[in-house]
Image (cartoon, coloured by chain):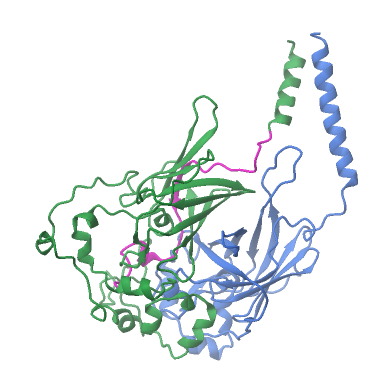
Amino acid sequence: MNLLTRGMLVVAAVLVSVPAFAQFDITGKWASRSSQDAQERGPGPDPVDYLGLPLNDEGRARALSYNYSMLSLPDGQCGYHTPFYIVLGPFGLHIWNEFDPVSAKLVAWKIGAWVDRDVTTIWMDGRPHPSPNAPRTYAGFTTGRWEGNTLITTTTHMKATQIRRNGAPVSDQATMTMYVFRHGDLLTIRAVMDDPVYFSEPLVRSRVWAMDPNGTLNMGNGVASPCEPIAELPIADTADVVPHYLPGQNPFVKELTERHNIPVEAVLGGAETMYPEYRKKLKDYVPPAICKRYCGCGGLGVPCIEDGTGVPK
Amino acid sequence: MKSAIPLLLLSLLVTAAAGAQGRATQAPVSTARADAPIDLTGYWVSVVTQDWRWRMVTPAKGDYASIPITLEAKKAGDNWDPARDEAAGEQCKSYGAPALMAVPTRLRISWQDASTLKVETDAGTQTRLFYFGDKRPQRGAPTWQGDSVAQWERPRAARGAAAKGGSLKVVTSRLRPGYLRKNGVPYGTDAVLTEYWDVSADPNGDQWITLTSTVQDDRYLREPWVTALNFKKERDGAKWDPTPCSAR
């Protein structure tokens, strides 16, 4: 084969090698970039802060029964978050792919674990979801497909756990859909959690990551922490004790109102509170005179105010 | 046989080129509106599930959570005085383009003409104009909504097939200085806003805009301020409720 023939073969190969689908590559390391919900993603939400959650009455009742000491129960110590935590947690993403060694076709994307979230495997090979009666796991079961330039994933079979790190619940009947968009070095995920048990409408949240080839920024360990339950709480050593609050006895219900002047009705969440017209019900709101806690800090001499004194540290 | 391979390949290339030329001559005159890979028009509503305490109500003075401010920005924010803004007729300082999309609002999106997409908000009664192609806004003093240059972004398509889906990229500059947040977190006249608008549909049929935004401002931000916001499509404008800007 002479040089001309080889050259023309290369050109012809380029002409016919357009990908079969409109896709992009999501493999690599992505640093967390969303500048939103700093308190929820960092130190954590206040004990009763259901702002912006579409909880129904059942969900609200379950949330208010939550006691942080539940985390010290053996099953609580071994509890992870579901893949929805991808858009809630503070960490970066490490994503890789796995191919069939014979056909070289993509089998799955994998989103690496964090200390409190298991690996999320996104099956791309067309396999069906398990039976509705199959056991649940914290990671659930996820499949993916391309629609134009969007990767859409569906997750089922997740264990019941928290949708916010203050006990706001999500049931094992929930399903999650993720929409993955890439724009240059930015990766945006919109996640939709639909829970027929505890929500009155789906919960939608989005986050952004930026490509970070060296993976230097807060990747969340890459593996879920091993679970070695121990006796943490003497009272829980008795099998018939489960920490909880009975209806009407949660001591933190008014805390957000006292700190930020936000009415209790809003603090307790509900789909109505997510829409602009709800602001009409907040017309008497007056902001606190000055921020005293978690006010934003760090970098270039901007001091932290985080202990409730209002004094920068 | 050996000598036939180059001829065959040459024939393939010529045929492909001729086909491309033929398609080009038959193509109608394109406009941004005609070429739109996604439909953004209609009424959309903010769904506030993120930063509720900083969006649905005005946060306390000195609350800069989530925004990567510089010390100069903190000093400016510490001096926030809504009464002074009202007296100066600057109630719209927190309704400029870098902040507007995070304000709980409804959007009314329509084509002003074949090359200009109009985005209106009922909160603050603001109008943004996205200019495609060679069309540019008239240069004047910086404004709350600045000058926005838009372009469609399309995925690569399978050979012989039309590309499906796409996104809108908008870059906005020449901004009148304002607030990133209602409690006086500033941005300056050199701030640049870059946005990507994506549309997707949920399993229940709801349509959503996901808006990825980056604000760059070397004076007041120590790194770009990156956010993602969500808007759900509504059937009509029944809930469209224009309200004036408020400094408080």
Please identify the dominant SS of the magenta region: loop
Residue A45 magenta-drawn?
yes
Q: Which chain is green?
A: A
- Residue A284, compared with residue A114, is above or below; it is below
Of residues A42 and B205, the one drawn nearer to the viewer in this rendering: B205
Of residues A258 and A311, the one drawn nearer to the viewer in this rendering: A258
How many marks the image carries: the answer is 0
Q: Is residue A47 left or right of residue B45?
A: left
Of residues A223 and A201, the one drawn nearer to the viewer in this rendering: A201
Quadrant where the N terminus of chain A lies? top right
Residue at screen point 87% across, 38% down: B21
**Which stretch did the figure color magenta?**
A18-47
Residue A118 magenta-drawn?
no
Of residues A239 and A229, the one drawn nearer to the viewer in this rendering: A239
Residue at screen point 81% across, 8% down: B1
Q: Position of residue B124 (x, y in %)?
A: 60, 81
Q: Is residue B87 left or right of residue A218?
A: right
- Residue A52, compared with residue B211, is above or below; it is below
Q: Quadrant of residue A305?
A: bottom left
Q: Position of residue B176 (x, y in %)?
A: 61, 74
Q: Position of residue B63 (x, y in %)?
A: 39, 75
Q: Quadrant of residue A298?
A: bottom left
Give the color of chain B as drawn: blue
Quadrant where the C terminus of chain A lies? bottom left
Q: Is residue B125 left or right of residue A278?
A: right
Q: Is residue A42 visible?
A: yes
